[in-house]
Amino acid sequence: EHGVKKQSLSESARRSKVEKDRARIAAYRHHTAATLKAKQNNVFSAKTLADTAKLLALNPEFNAIWNYRRDILSALISQDPATKTSLQDELHMVKGMMREYPKCYWLWNHRRWCLEELSRDHMADWDYELALVLKVLEMDSRNFHGWHYRRYVVAEIEREQHEKFTDAEETAVADLTLYFAEYRYATFKIEKNISNFSAWHNRAKLIPRIFQLLENFTNFEALGEYRSTADLFRSPLTLLHYELGLVKTGMFMDAADTSVWLFMRWLLTDDIFVADLKKSSGETYLQILEQQLLAVKELNGLEKEDSPNNADDVGCVKMMVFIKALINQQNSHDNLQDPEIRDHLALLAKIDPIRKGRFMDRMKGLSPLTF
């Protein structure tokens, strides 16, 4: 373990440990063989359910046993539908295991299965699940399993709202309130840790959905505390300026942070923003690209000043190539004939030699510049 000093064992202690480990391994193998045999024979009983629990406590990554456990639960529930409430015990079991294994795919997968089964009879508590994943992300704000699960839970809450409300306007207000809360949450997580890739990614998922929900929406007074957030979404241009301000803060805090650069690329290329900006002459889009190029050049200059050998920053130079290529596309200019782009690519091949081949391919036109 990290931060734990290794202790040397005496010869007798080492032999004792080896014997204990050997016994545990033998017991695990025996238990595994017996459980897999029961699986092969389609034995679905309370005993085999208990056996899978013991095995999964030892090895939560054993996906075949999780599958078997779900088969057992399905069989028991089909025999007696009243036993479906036992899925609440499953959720409790999984929650306990997640404390130790918060990034185990199969735990998250099993939890979703339980909730989907419970949801068929309106027995799933999605508000509880949202509170649970809030705690998970408090423990590790960059746990991508937690962020993925959060999107799943929010989608289920939205689905339930559509079943609950019959009035279209009431439904729209509920949906927007839900997604504006998520947008604020992503902002909060990014402001706490600008390197939170999962929060940036979630933001890119939320923005299109919010714009979709705002189509033909007029009752902004009903949004209450989220009215100010809704004002950011008055137009794609308004939001773009706000988001680019957040990105600028991030990139000046840490130029080496890949997540900020990736989100910036999304902002400058996604149709939500670009299509809207190009509705007129496209001049507004060009102005934004030029502004961002200047900001990145300014940052690169600062990074060079701070560098002991006056070196350019790889992330900055990559972004300069990316934005200049977008400008050339907008102006119908040939990127490969642009001396600034060629100089930047040659520089990247020098300061990032591991990826030299990639940059040389781009210089030859063998791969796109908007990478």
Image (cartoon, rainbow, N blue to C red):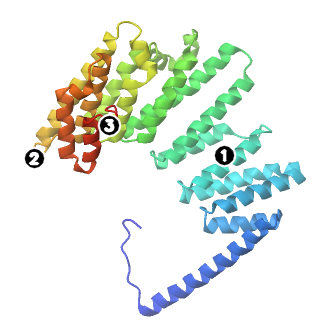
The residue at the point 18 percent across, 28 percent down is 340
Q: Amino acid at mark 2?
A: Asn
Q: Earlier in the sequence, mark 1 or mark 3?
A: 1
Q: Earlier in the sequence, mark 1 or mark 2?
A: 1
Q: Position of residue 109 (x, y in %)?
A: 63, 50
The disc placed on residue 112 is: 1
Task: Please tell me in which quadrant of the rendered image residue 173 appears.
Answer: top right
The residue at the point 71 percent across, 54 percent down is 90
- Assign a secondary structure to mark 3: loop
Crowd band around label 1 with a 10 angstrom C-alpha radius: few (<14), some (14–19), many (20+): some
The disc placed on residue 38 is: none
Q: Nearer the viewer, mark 1 or mark 2?
A: 2
Q: Which residue is mark 2?
A: 309
The residue at the point 61 percent across, 23 percent down is 175
Q: Which residue is mark 3?
A: 366
Distance CA(mark 1)–CA(mark 3): 43 Å
Eyeballing the image, is 58 above or below 66?
A: below
